[in-house]
Image (cartoon, rainbow, N blue to C red):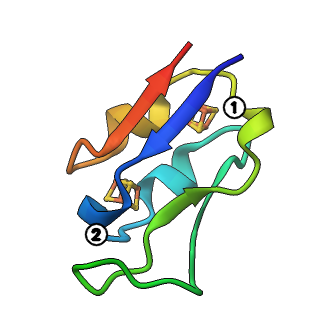
């Protein structure tokens, strides 16, 4: 099964990964602030991930890892 991992402390909460994911796996965690003071992206539907890696490709800060 594909697995997406986000280094949340390095995320700047831009939301690009959220908007590009075709399976709606990711969301910004509005209940959490990371060390930089942003709402970090988090996998809310991890079981739906198909490992396409579009999120990792889009992330401007390269903080997403996808294992397939
Ligand atoms: S690998 Fe694809 S399906 Fe999985 S979270 Fe990233 S964009 Fe979504
Ligand atoms: S694209 Fe990268 S920096 Fe932007 S919200 Fe997603 S994980 Fe965070």
N-terminal label among 1 and 2: 2
Q: Position of residue 1 (x, y in %)?
A: 72, 16
Where in the image, quadrant-wise, is ligand 1 located? top right
Using the image, determine if residue 35 lies above or below residue 8.
below
Which residue is more in the foreground, 17 or 7?
Answer: 7
SS label for mark 2: loop
- Residue 23 x %, y %: 73, 39
Q: In this view, does 30 lie above or below 41?
A: below
The residue sitting at 69% across, 31% down in the picture is 49
Residue at numbered disc 2: 12
Left or right of 32 on screen, residue 8 = left
Mark pair 1, 2: CA separation: 22 Å
Q: Position of residue 35 (x, y in %)?
A: 25, 79
Secondary element at tag 1: loop
Q: Is residue 58 above or below residue 26?
A: above
Residue at mark 1: 49
**Quarter of the view holding residue 40:** bottom left
Disc 1 residue lies near ligand 1 with CB under 8 A: yes
Question: How many neighbours does mark 1 have within 10 angstroms: few (below 14), some (14-19), or many (20 or more)?
Answer: many
- Seen from this angle, which residue lies furthest top? 68
Q: Residue 11 carries which label?
A: none
Where in the figure is residue 19, as x and y percent of width and height? 55, 55
State left or right for residue 50 relative to residue 18.
Answer: right
The answer to which of 31 and 19 lies nearer the viewer is 31
Q: Does the residue labelled 2 lie within 8 Å of ligand 2?
A: yes
Q: In which quadrant of the rendered view does residue 31 lie?
A: bottom right
Residue at (29% x, 65% y) in the render: 9
């Amino acid at each position: 099964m594909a697995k997406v991992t986000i280094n949340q402390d390095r995320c700047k909460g831009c939301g690009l990964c959220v908007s590009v994911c075709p399976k709606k796996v990711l969301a910004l965690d509005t209940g959490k602030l990371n060390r930089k003071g942003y709402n970090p992206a988090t996998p809310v539907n991890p079981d739906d991930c198909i490992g396409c890696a579009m999120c990792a490709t889009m992330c401007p800060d390269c903080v997403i890892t996808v294992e397939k």
